[in-house]
Amino acid sequence: MICYRLRCQHDHQFEGWYKDSATFAMLQQKGLLACPECGDAEVQQALMAPAIAKSGVVAPQAERPAPPPEPGGQMPDLGKGISDQAVVALQKMRQAVEQNCENMKDQFAREALRIHHGEAPERGIYGSATEHEQDMLREEGVNVLALPWVRRADS
């Protein structure tokens, strides 16, 4: 995963996480990026300091402990009580994660460790992880990002 600092035409700055630079370019070209503050789709990369990560993994869940996935692997809707613009941005983020990463469901922590230790191919993954599992992954040196998992834009 790669993190870009982004900026809209109204000079709002925010971060975006992508599988790789080609994925970012494709999403930008298709107009699937938007500023979470104003919804502007004219999003460009802003200057930022580089960061080096050991492994690229994503754990889509809220900062607070999230309930387990619903039957069929669906995460619960955690988008209640946030602005419409933020929901749209999170829906686009969810779409990018689902299109570019492999869903490990409740095996996320196990597979993230396998990737980190070189026992599985390096790739973007997502799934559910308990707070304890997230802490364990961070102690192992695995970069884990918890995302609020909102309802899909088409549901």
Image (cartoon, rainbow, N blue to C red):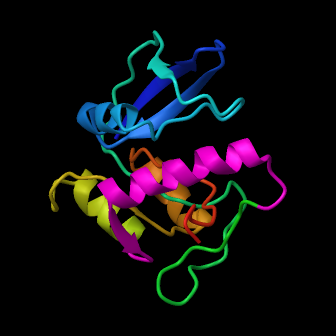
Asked which quadrant contains residue 30, the reply is top left
The answer to whether residue 58 shows anywhere in this view is no
Image height check: is 35 above or below 147?
above
Q: Position of residue 39 (x, y in %)?
A: 65, 34
The structure residue drawn at horizontal position 34% and vertical position 58%, both measured from the top left corner, is: 99
Residue 149 lies within the magenta run: no
**Quarter holding the N terminus?**
top left
Q: Position of residue 125 (x, y in %)?
A: 34, 59
Image height check: is 54 above or below 133?
above
User: 117 left or right of 30?
Assistant: left
Q: Kindly give the residue lying farthest to the right in the view shown.
A: 81
Q: Magenta segment, principal secondary structure?
A: helix
Image height check: is 66 above or below 16?
below
**Quarter holding the C terminus?**
bottom right
The structure residue drawn at horizontal position 49% and vertical position 58%, both measured from the top left corner, is: 59
Image height check: is 6 above or below 123?
above
User: 154 left or right of 30?
Assistant: right
Q: Position of residue 61 (x, y in %)?
A: 60, 61
User: 78 left or right of 58?
Assistant: right
Camera-nearest residue between 57 and 27: 27
User: 13 left or right of 81?
Assistant: left
Residue 93 lies within the magenta run: yes
The structure residue drawn at horizontal position 38% and vertical position 51%, both measured from the top left corner, is: 57
In the image, the segment drawn in magenta is 80-107
The structure residue drawn at horizontal position 68% and vertical position 51%, both measured from the top left corner, is: 87
Q: How many marks?
A: 0
